[in-house]
Each structure stands twice: as structure tokens, then as C-alpha cells.
Amino acid sequence: MSSAMADKRHELLSDIADHVAEVLKEHGIDADVTEQAGNAVADHLSQTWAGSTICIPKDHRFKLSKRDLVILSEFKGNNHHALAMKYDLTENAIYKLLKRVQDRKFDREQGKLDLGDGLS
């Protein structure tokens, strides 16, 4: 009898394996190879992170996405709540996103980073 947590772990690893295989297929890799690669990635994650508790955030912390840049362009100084509702985020997530974007812009202006992320 498997537990709900075991089922969830299996679902996560299966999803990862399937997604890796699908991305590789989209890049023209043979189906047999894509399945093997997907399983290898899932096995690696399972072995490397076994026993760990990991929370996967909705938002990427270190990479500005196109969505982040759109949110920045729509930010009017006082519309945190409206942006949170529109993009299915919390207001706290909007504050953090804007701070991250502003910090990256500051680093760019100081000549510290060339991020290639569309900020000028």
C-alpha cells in the first residue's frame, strides 16, 4: 500500500521524465533516446535529493522572465494588488519581484552584470 506522499513523489518524477523527453523530442532527438534521458534525469534527481524536503516556488528567483518584465512595465507605483490578482501571485510576491528587478537594474547601471534579460 503506497502513501499519498509516495504517490506524489512518483507523480513528480514521472512528470520530470516526461517533460525532459518531450523537450528533447521537440529538438529532434529520437524517441528512444528521449525516454532514456528523461528517466536518467528523474533518477538523478531522486538519488541526489533523496530524503530532502524541497519547496518549489511559483516564481523563479534568479532569472527574470518575460512575465516579470511585463509586470514591471505595468507597475504604476501603487497597483501591487491588481498585479497580484492579474498574475495569480501574492502581493508579497509582487513586492519581491519588483525588488529583484530593481536590484538587477541597479547592478546593470553600476556595470556589474550583463544579464541579457531585456533590461536597459
Image (spheres, rainbow, N blue to C red):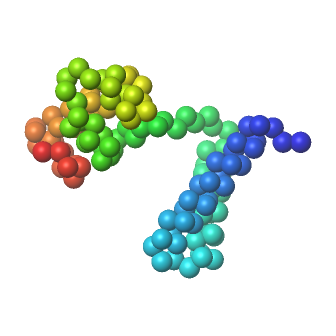
**What is the total number of numbered labels drawn onto the structure image?**
0
- Residue located 62% across and 54% down the image: 15
Residue 9 x/y as whole percent: 69, 44
Residue 74 x/y as whole percent: 23, 34
Residue 21 x/y as whole percent: 57, 66
- Residue located 28% across and 36% down the image: 71
Residue 46 vs residue 2, the one in the foreground: 2
Q: Is residue 41 visible?
A: no
Give the left or right position of residue 101, taking residue 26 as reference.
left
Give the left or right position of residue 19, taking residue 5 as reference.
left
Residue 105 vs residue 112, the one in the foreground: 105
Residue 31 vs residue 79, the one in the foreground: 79
- Residue located 43% across and 33% down the image: 88
Identity of the residue furthest to the right in this view: 1
Image quadrant holding the C terminus, namely top left
Residue 70 x/y as whole percent: 26, 41
Q: Is residue 23 visible?
A: yes
- Residue located 52% across and 72% down the image: 25
Give the left or right position of residue 85, taking residue 50 as reference.
left
Q: Quadrant of residue 59?
A: top left
Q: From the viewer's perspective, is residue 16 above or below residue 38?
A: above
Image quadrant holding the N terminus, namely top right
